[in-house]
Amino acid sequence: MGSAKECIENGKAILGIEFGSTRIKAILIDEAHIPIASGSHEWENRLENGFWTYSLEDIGKGLKACYSSLLQDVRSRYGTGIKRLGAIGFSAMMHGYMVFDKKGGLLVPFRTWRNGTTGLAADALTELFQYQIPQRWSIAHLYQAILNEEEHVPDIDFMTTLAGYIHWQVTGEKVLGIGDASGMFPIDAGTKTYDQAMIRQFDQLTAERAYSWKLAEILPRICLAGESAGVLTKEGACMIDESGELESGIPVCPPEGDAGTGMAATNSVAVGTGNVSAGTSAFVMIVLDKLPQKVHPEIDLVTTPDGSLVGMVHANNCTSDLNAWVGLFAEALESFGVKVDAGHLYATLYNKGLEGEHDCGGLLSYGFLSGENIVRVAQGRPMILRTPKSRFTLANVMRSHLYAALAALKLGMDILTREEEVQVAQIYGHGGFFKTPVVGQRIMAAAMGTPVTVLETAGEGGAWGMALLAAYMLQREPDQTLESYLAQRVFAGSKGSRMDPLPEDREGFEKYIERFRAGLDVERRAGELV
């Protein structure tokens, strides 16, 4: 404790803050990368005028509240405050659409990654570039706004992501880490910047509209992991710390997306390594040694924080419907006067799922709270289906929901491993799906068809990964790669639990996924009718 207190008081502690879908989390680490304090703030997006969004007020208040929670933890643990830090890093949900005019005013409310409203634009750009452009990417949102002839488009001066926006506000720098930037517009892995040929194609596509801007002029400047991305301004310090104690001038590393911080937090930046993040949404990322042979709508091509090519399967939905079912069981118990600890309830129900039949007894679940691009579902409608012959038991219901949380992700992963023949030795898992020991890991191994390892540090999540990237900027040796830094200085000797896929689980999941595919028309039709 004394060492941690000295680290904080000497201004050597390093801070990572990540804006997730439902929680903003801060992790403070020491010079040995060990978490020494944390803070968090719960928040939630809203569906307004047809778009999932968070307001700028939500973002500002959330940042202050999260830091205040961290500061309270520091004072409680160590009896001191925070005046200076060694470095800071900010990360957030990738993709989405934030556009500003020349005065820095937000032109339309923030459109998050969750919106499935850019189908026409995404398809047109994929065809034009011969490169997969998902609906949630920033360029798809921009082109859809152009196709819709939205009034704000001619006034755009700057476009960025949530992490890029926060970084801009606290440093004045319009920059973005390459991993986050790769979810805005395609990256040239050779030059580690935006693909210039595709930039020209886009400008030609929109030339007749005679906007005052060109695409390259409104995109943030790309930074690689380890580079300096500015310092905290006096105004920025006030935006973070309401107490006014935090000093300006603190180095700030390139802002990154949650995919990049997940890679850092699981030591998955080397070719052939992979990680899966499973929470509100889910994504699996495999570092590739070459471009896929074909363009697959289910596979995004993004990069690591230092610019290596990554194949990414992103599912908009994962645990939201599963959480709702656990909440329903909690309500049922409370109606009988039984109050159960949430963690105990989750563990009990998740483990009950392992008692279910390997194919879920003929049950079928769809946990789509929102649209799901991987399977071309525009409007999510959570549902559970069964035939008169299905075995409708609690164990089968829970196993069905556990499978459903990963079903879309599995369909995308199968393309990488079976069609593109990508070899994956093992995948590192992190996120809320793995909080209950064994269960999430075992189901994920069955879905991915590869061993899944959960490190002891997996619970720290993306905020810790962001702190590691800030530490890399501050502490790396000259010319030391991110891969080397993580392997030698962060994860050397780290412990974790590995689980290989069980044959009976894999067989059961394959039977389940056949029903899942066959029933997708029902899910799509439900979105049209209800």
Image (cartoon, helix red, strand yellow):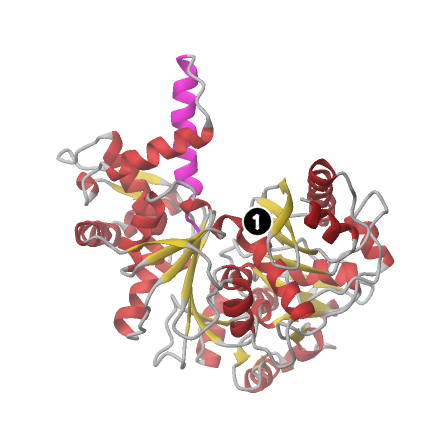
Dividing the picture into quadrants, the one containing residue 288 is bottom left
Residue numbers of the magenta segment: 316-336
Q: Is residue 525 visible?
A: no
Position of the C terminus, as image quadrant, is top left
Report if residue 329 lies within the magenta region. Answer: yes
* 515 vs 213: above or below: above
Numbered-mark total: 1
Q: Which residue is found at the position 56% from the left and 44% from the top?
A: 22
Main secondary structure found in the magenta portion: helix
Please tell me which residue lies in front, 237 or 114: 237
* Mark 1 surroundings: few (<14), some (14-19) or many (≥20) residues within 10 A: many
* Image quadrant containing the N terminus: top right
On the rendered structure, is 342 left or right of 158?
left
Which residue reaches farthest top? Answer: 337
Across and down, in percent, residue 148 comes to: 59, 64
Amino acid on which the number 1 mark rests in the picture: Trp
Q: Secondary structure at mark 1?
A: strand
Residue sitting nearer the eye, 224 or 111: 224
Describe residue 259's horizontal placement relative to residue 250 as left or right: left
Where is residue 258? Give x, y as percent.
55, 59
Would residue 429 be counted in the magenta stretch? no
Q: Quadrant of residue 418?
A: bottom left
Identify residue for label 1: 52
The x, y position of residue 523, in whole percent, is 33, 47
Residue 208 location, quadrant: bottom right
At a point 13% along the width and 35% down the height, the residue shown is 389
